[in-house]
Image: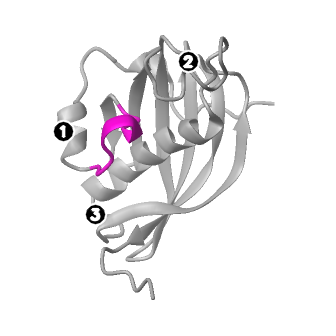
Amino acid sequence: MPSVPLVDMSEFDFAKPIYTLDDIRRVNPQRHEMEQLTAIIHINEETNTVVGYKDITDKEFWAAGHMPGFPLMPGVIQCEAAAQLGGFYARKYNLIGGDYLGFGGMDSVRFRKPIFPNCRLDLVARVTRVRARKLAQFRFQGFVDNQMMFEGEMLGVIVNRDLDLG
């Protein structure tokens, strides 16, 4: 049974983003085939909610091989898109600091329907917990044509460039 949507996507004007891809690039470090956001259309600091989307084309790096003749968006890429949305919010509003925001874990992830190229994947993330200078926890959901396609929870943790890898 699907969860209740975190927001009513019909309330937003997807044609008028508040942050474009160029704006996202000033906050998020991902580039090239790992960029999984197209725009941010809504931010509510009172509810710690961010809404954005990814335009999915048939030119995605995974489309030819996952699966040949049946291009199915990998679940890990769906989660990456949601993580980049949550990461944008956490970094833009300096929720936890650090050089980067990395995956700390995921829980209760459910893939409800397959996602194929040539659609717009609408995404929402809401902060549910913050431990300053440690982590930010988010709920996330993804929609295509107002149908919930996936949902879950993730932890974003700080990652600094000066990691001791020895």
The quarter of the image holding the C terminus is: bottom left
Residue at 33 percent of width and 28 percent of height: 38
Q: What is the quadrant of the N terminus in the image? A: top right
Which residue sits at x=22%, y=30%? 20
Characterize the magenta stretch by its predominant secondary structure: loop
Instruction: Name the residue type under label 3.
Output: Asn
Between 12 and 110, the one lying in front of the other is 110
Magenta highlight range: 28-37
Report x, y in % for residue 65. Answer: 60, 25
Choose the circle earlier in sequence order: 3 or 2.
Answer: 3
Residue underneath mark 3: 94
- Mark 3–mark 2 Cα distance, whole angstroms, equals 30 Å
Q: Amino acid at mark 2?
A: Val
Estimate the spatial distance between the alpha carbons at disc 1 and disc 2, rounded to whole Å: 24 Å
Which residue lies under the disc numbered 1?
Answer: 23
At 32% across and 39% down in the image, what residue appears?
A: 43
Q: Which residue is mark 2?
A: 144
